[in-house]
């Protein structure tokens, strides 16, 4: 297997995992299980990243 194919396969796996996690998060939000916070709280958390 050449390097380009391995790299493409890895990126595809990462994309599929991202899609799966995004779909799960959307379902939680639709069930009302999302997190709510003020804009200030959001900015504070963002700064901690």
Image (cartoon, rainbow, N blue to C red):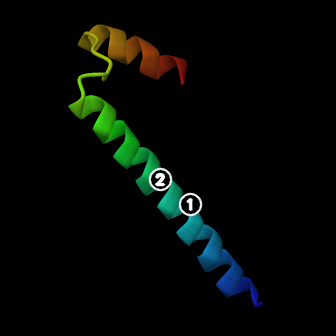
Q: Quadrant of residue 12?
A: bottom right
Identity of the residue drawn at 37% across and 37% down? 25
Q: Secondary structure at mark 1?
A: helix
Residues 28 and 46: in front is 28
Task: Say which residue label 2 marks.
Answer: 18
Q: Is residue 28 above or below residue 47?
A: below
Residues 39 and 36: in front is 36
Task: Say which residue label 1 marks.
Answer: 14
Identity of the residue drawn at 52% across and 55% down? 17
Residue sitting at the far front: 31
Location of the N terminus (image quadrant): bottom right
Q: Secondary structure at mark 2?
A: helix
Identity of the residue drawn at 62% across and 76% down? 9
**Alpha carbons under labels 1 and 2: distance apart:** 6 Å
Q: Is residue 7 left or right of residue 27?
A: right
| Image location (x, y in percent) of residue 14 | 56, 60
Residues 7 and 27: in front is 27
| Image location (x, y in percent) of residue 28 | 32, 32
Residue sitting at the far right: 1
Q: Is residue 15 above or below residue 32?
A: below
Q: Is residue 22 above or below residue 16?
A: above
Residue sitting at the far bottom: 2
Dots 1 and 2: beta carbons under 8 Å? yes
Identity of the residue drawn at 53% across and 17% down? 48
Location of the C terminus (image quadrant): top right
Q: Residues within 10 Å of mark 2 (few under 14, many from 20)?
A: few
Q: Residues within 10 Å of mark 1 (few under 14, many from 20)?
A: few
Which numbered tag is attached to residue 3? none
| Image location (x, y in percent) of residue 42 | 34, 16
Q: Quadrant of residue 43?
A: top left
Q: Is residue 8 left or right of residue 41?
A: right
Q: Quadrant of residue 36?
A: top left
């Amino acid at each position: 297997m050449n390097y380009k194919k391995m790299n493409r396969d890895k990126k595809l796996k990462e994309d599929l995992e991202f899609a799966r996690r995004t779909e799960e998060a959307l379902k939680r939000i639709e069930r009302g299980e999302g997190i709510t916070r003020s804009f200030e709280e959001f900015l504070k958390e963002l700064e901690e990243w």
